[in-house]
Image (spheres, rainbow, N blue to C red):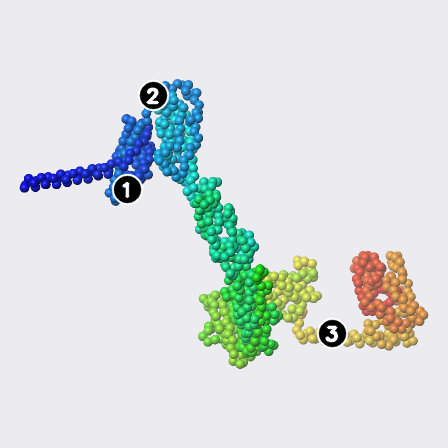
Amino acid sequence: MALAAARQGGSLCRTACRQLLFGLLVLSLFCEACKKVTFNVPSKLEAGTLVGRVNLKECLKSTEHISSSDPDFRILEDGSVYTTNIISLSSEKKTFTILLKDIQRHEEKKIHVNLLAHQKKTPKTRHTRDTILRRTKRRWAPLPSSMMENSLGPFPMQIQQVQSDTAQNYVIHYSAAGPGIDQDPKGLFYIERETGNIFATGPVDREQFPSFTIICYATTPDGYSPEKPLPHVIKIEDDNDNAPFFTQDLFEFVVPEHCNAGTVVGKVIAQDRDEPNTLHTKLRYRIVSEQPQLPQMFSVHHESGVITTQKQQLDREIISKHVLLIEVRDMDGQSFGLCNTGTVVINVGDINDNAPYFGHSSYETKVLENRVNVEILRIPCLDKDEPNSPAWNCRFSIVKGNEDNHFAITTDGRTNEGVLCVVKGLDYETTSLRILEIAASNEIPYAVVPYSSSLSHSSCTVRVTVLDDDEGPVFKPCLFPITIDGCATVGTVVGKYLAEDPETGNSEGIRYRIAPGQSNWITIDENSGELRTAKLFDKDMTGRQCNITVFAVDQSGKTGTGTVLATVSACNRYYPTVTPTDFTMCRDRKPVYITAVTSNESPYSAPFRFDISDRSMGSGWQTTQQDDRSILLSPRTDIPFGIYKIPINVRDNAGRLGTNMVTVNYCDCTTPSDCGTVRQVLPAVTLGVWAILAMILGSLLLLLILITLCGCYGTGAVSKHVPDDLANQNLIISNTEAPGEEVMDPNIIPLQAATVHSCDQGVGIGTIGHEVKTGGQSFEMSKGGHQTLESVRGYGQSTMEQGRYSYSEWQNFMHSRLGEKVYMCRQDEENKHSEDYVLPYNYEGRGSLAGSVGCCSDQQEVEVLDFLDQLEPKFRTLAETCVKR
């Protein structure tokens, strides 16, 4: 029994051992190499040299830990095997293991790597001439190699081989450098040292690396280079692995409504990352769908991607937006090409194809008379065009009934309503009803398109009823600013604030008062509205302001309100003054330049206003404003020489008045420095009203005495020299229109035909004058010539008895001469012997020099005078030729 139990126990133990051994065997087999990899490498490897690349995912898809059994080798995550130290293969074979672990799944894999050294060839002795007689072999310059993009392998995959013909004589070692080998991306290619075969270790993306240029070297073991470095290009052939794509996620365009067919809407753009100028990047466009589903309104050019309209039926008021789904496909649009889609939104732009219109044809409103700037009516404007656009915004105008401009209408930009206002007060007594015609149009011109109205605007009628209203007084302006001088005394007038009755437009019967609780700075006169200071102001109050409410109450008890804005200014005690105050004026009466100055600041400064305070002086002197600070002072008329004291008032910009006494020395001089002792003309300055009246009465009395004396003398002369029977036949020289009774006077010269005598210069003048026929006898009145006073008087005495002429004949002769002009030859002081003469104005010598006119000498001036004025009062004797005064 015991033996059986022992046997059974031993059997169980052996079974357990067998199971354990089997498990260890399974684990051992599980940890055995997943695969074996063999690399042909040179016998000597430098540190950091890429040995090759192992596909780790074939053994373990998820690897968390990678290690090497040989510390001379380092394994990267992509399976690249690099040396960490210099390695020399003593034998032709070297083996190590790559251990892969997945900690989460508790899996381990091993990859055995075998390194085989290249077989060495027996080197031959190279001669010196070998270095001289080298030439490049074709085998050392192969065609550029290529590799398909995204190649599936197997890897390493040989893509090219470089060889040197010198390998027939020497042992040649091949190497390469450049991108893909020892530069990023490192380890993508390598070259076998012994054979010159170039291998790719994995797939390449052409869009990232379209080509590689590597440099190949051929050297002997002792470092000799029988060949030049060879640049070798590895081109990556394109694979159509990239679908085209649009440059924007969403294309958005705007096209005006009712545009013509063929109008360009916009252009969609797509790109392809594959190799240009190949079928892989030859794109074609087409419209997949269009929303809303109507007859297709748009088309796209299959090559350029330009979208155009197909019909002229786009109407924003019906459909304002269209959505297109557009496809782009490479391989020239072939069905096997790669494709992509994009969205295009086309907004239909608004044009002014809908005229504005009113909701009603007529409106009514009311307004109280005399109301100004009040809104009386809002008129809605309707438009089907896009809101808040120039085609929707309405502009109103009053086309009829507003000839006197009492109304104005504007647009409320938020509601697009017409706001009708009264801008000038209406008078109920004049008219109680106003009828207006109002038109509405848009900001931009109306566009006539198919199915649109031919009217570009709309109109309506507004009836405005004017209501009678008795309003209270109104202040003008509503806000009245005043400035109070900081040094003003109590009771100083600082302004006048008046209100008026809107009905009458005047301020009669209106009383004023300041509202209770206001500032005590000012008071207002109840009747006149004058504002006066009510207190003294400290320096601390300078610059302070105060709003004071003022009431105006009319006789009916209605009240109006206004506001006075009072500002306290700095205390300015200085008034404008004139500097200098003493002037000298010569006989040329050149104006005096007077300037005012002040030390105050604005508003107590320029511009200044000037005037003469003494009215009696103001009648003889005048001022002319030159600029803001000065005037010109000059006499109005001829005044005697002397010293004049003239009071000048100067007001600053705030109205503050300063009086200055200006002294002007009017001197008989050429320049002010020539002026000597002068006399002061005090009477001309201080004459009063009574003095002037006394002077006038005295002058009248003296004139009366002279008239009496002249009358007495004239009566005696007539009775002494002129017989009574000759009175009716002689001319009477008189300053009156009618001489009264005919008288006889020895000074009267009877008229006869006269001959013009030659002048002193011997110039023959001829007969000039007028001929008068009297009783079969003719006489001639001549001007010009040259005779002395004695000859004229003698002639008058000799001809006194020869004939008598009636006053009517003389009057007929003189009547034709009224208004006729004559030349007056004036004698000068240097030519004492010359005489004054009168010549006809129409004398043929007129317009020339004075010496050429008639009998005037070269030293005489010529003056044009009235013939009758010169003949009657100045010439008491009638001459035939030249008449002496």
Q: Which image quadrant for residue 261?
A: bottom right
The residue indicated by pointer 2 is: 122
Q: In front here: 323 or 760?
A: 323
Above or below, comparing residue 465 to residue 354 in the picture: below
Question: Regarding mark 3 in the picture, which secondary structure is present there?
Answer: helix
Check disc 3 and report the residue beneath it: 699
Residue at position x 87%, y 73% from top? 808
Report whether residue 874 is seen: no
On the rendered structure, is 827 left or right of 500? right
Nearer-the-camera pick, 379 or 514: 379
**Depicted 65 relative to depicted 440: above or below:** above
**Sequence-wise, which precedes: disc 2 or disc 3?**
2
Tell us which disc is closer to us: 1 or 3: 1
Crowding at dot 2, Cα within 10 Å, few <14 / some 14-19 / many 20+, comes out as few
SS at circle 2: loop
Q: Local crowd at mark 3 within 10 Å, few (<14), some, or many (≥20)?
A: few
Q: Amino acid at mark 1?
A: Glu
Crowd tier of the residue under label 1, counting other residues whose Cα lies within 10 Å: few below 14, some 14–19, many 20 or above: few
Residue at x 6% of width, y 39% of height: 3
Q: Which mark is residue 808?
A: none
From the viewer's perspective, tell me whether residue 290 is left or right of residue 219: right
Which numbered disc covers residue 64?
1
Give the secondary structure at mark 1. Answer: loop
Badge 3 amino acid: Ser
Horizontal side of residue 626 vs 391, given as left or right:
right
Of 629 and 403, the residue lying toward us: 403
